[in-house]
Image: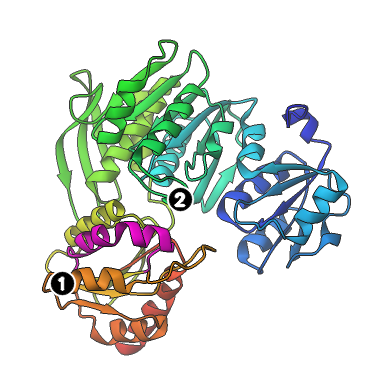
Amino acid sequence: MSTLNLQGLMSKHVHFIGMGGSGMSGIARIMLAHGIRVSGSDAKDSATLSGLQTLGAKVFVGHSAAQIAGADVLVVSSAVLESNPELVAAKEAGVLILSRAQALALLMSESKAIAVAGTHGKTTTTSMLTVALQGAGMDPSFAIGGMINRSGTNSHLGTGNIFVAEADESDGSFLAYRPFGAIITNIELDHVDHFPDLEAVLSLFEDFVSSIQSGGFLVLGVDSPGVRELISRISRTDISLITYGAEAHFALSHVGLAATSAAARVTRKGKVMGELELAIPGAHNLENALAAYAAGLAVEADSIALLKGLATFSGARRRFENRGTVNGITVIDDYGHHPTELRVTLETARRFATTGRVITIFQPHRYSRTARFANDFAQSLKLADQVYLLEIYSAGEVAIPGVSSLLIAQKLDKDGNDFVQYEPSMIEVANQVINSAKPGDVIVLMGAGDVNSLAPVIVDGLAERFS
C-alpha cells in the first residue's frame, strides 16, 4: 500500500469481496463517487448491492475466481475466509490486497480526518458529528458502520475538507487511519475473541492515540473508567486533549430526559455555550452529542450551528430505531450486543414505555462474548419485564462446547426470576410476542445478528391481530 495514494487509486479497477457489508459498501460508494472503477461480490443479493449497481458498480452474487478478472486492487472484508476463491486467485495473480481499514485510510488520506472510536456509541457519535458538521455548512465526507436515518446512507463524498469515519477497534485495523482528530467515547473489554483482557484493549488504544497526527486533537469521555486509565498513560504534548463528562472541559447540566427526546445545557470550562436539544431519547445520547459538539468546535465549526445541527439528528439505523407502533405497542430495533449496551438501551426503553411493559428479544452475538459475559447479560436483562432469548448468532465463530443462550437463561433463573424464556425458534418467539403484547408495551429487539428481521414480522402480525 505504501506505493499507492489516493490519486493513484483513481486509475485502478478495485474489486471488493463482501461488498454488501455495511463498512465495505460505504467505501465502495465513495470510490464510485470518485469515479473509480468498482466491482464486487457477496454471498447473497441485497438492496445494498442493488444500490451500488445503480451507482455503476459491477456486482456478483456468489464467489468465483473469474470475477476478479482485470482487478488491480482487492479490498477484503475481515469476514472473508482465506479459502475464498477470489482471494486465492488474487494472491496467485499478485493483485494488491487491502483490508477494509487500509482502503478507507487511502480515501481519508487527503482530508482532515476525524476518527470516532470507543467500545460503545461509535456509530451514533459518528452520525451525530456528521449531521452537526452538515448543519454548520461544512459538507464532510463520511463513512459509518450504520445508516443515518436522515440521509438514508452510510457514506458520502463531501465537498469539504473534513472526513468523518467510524473507527472499529475489534481487530486493531483502525491504526491504519492516522487521523487529524479523534473521539474515544469509552473503553471496556469486548471482542474477547481478539482481546484476552482489558489491558490488551487499553494497549491498543494507546497505539491509536499515538497514530493521531501531530497538531491534532483527541476528545475523550472521562466518565468511562477505561478512558481515565488511558489518559493517565498519554504522554503526548503535541495534540490537544479535550475531555467531556463530569468534571471535564465540556459538561452537561439541567438535564431533561423524556420518552422520545433529551435536552441539556452545555458548558465549556464553566461557561454556558448553549442548549442541546435532541429528538432522540437517552442520557447516553446526550453524552454522544457532547462528544460530537466538542469535536466540531475543534475543527472550528460554529457553535450555534453545531447545536442546531444536532437538534435535527433523528437517529441511526438499529440504534433504538422505532420500527413501528400498532395499537399503542411500539417495536424498537437496537444493535446492542454488549452488557453495557443492553443496560443503557433497556433504561431508555423503560422511560419510553412509561406505564407499559418492556418486552425484550435478545440474540447474543458470538459464542466467546456469551461465555465471557453471561452473568453480565443476565444482570442487564433484569431491567426488562419479559425476556426471550434466541440462540447465539455465531458471526462465523466456531461454536464453543457448552456455550449457548441457556447460560444466560440459567443465570436469570438462579436469581428466582421467571420472566425469561429460552426459545431458539425466531418464528415462535415472534408469535408469542404478537399474541401477548398489550397497548403501552415496548418490544425491544436486541443483537448484532439478524434479530432485526423479526421487526417487520412483529409489526405486521400486530396489525393483523388488531385489525
Residue at x 87%, y 48% (from the top left corner)? 93
Q: Is residue 455 left or right of residue 171?
A: left
User: Residue tagged by mark 1?
Assistant: 414
* Quadrant in the picture for residue 256: top left
Q: Is residue 357 left or right of residue 55?
A: left
Q: Is residue 320 visible?
A: no
Q: Of helix, strand and loop, which mostly describes the magenta segment?
A: helix
Q: Quadrant of the C terminus?
A: bottom left
Residue type at mark 1?
Lys
Residue 25 screen position, x and y as percent:
63, 52
In the image, residue 302 lies in the stretch drawn in magenta: no
The residue pinned by badge 2 equals 150
Magenta segment: does it hold 377?
yes
The image shows residue 72 at horizontal and vertical percentages of: 83, 43
Amino acid found under the numbered disc labelled 2? Arg
Q: Residue at x 77, y 41 (%)?
A: 35
> Which quadrant holds residue 12?
top right
The x, y position of residue 100, in whole percent, is: 63, 44
Tell me the quadrant of the picture where the N terminus can be found: top right
Judging from the image, what secondary structure is the residue with disc 1 in?
A: helix
User: Is residue 148 depicted above or below 436 in this figure?
Assistant: above
Query: What span is colored magenta in the figure?
Result: 363-385
Q: Is 214 drawn above or below residue 251 in the view shown?
A: above
User: Which residue lies at the image location 37% right of the left edge and 86% below the top edge?
Assistant: 428
Q: Going by the image, does 387 lie left or right of 39? A: left
Local crowd size for mark 1, using a 10 Å CA cut-off: few (<14), some (14–19), many (≥20)? few
Give how far apart the Cα atoms at labels 2 and 1 are.
44 Å
- The residue drawn where x is 65% and y is 34% is 107
Ranked by sequence position, the earlier of labels 2 and 1 is 2
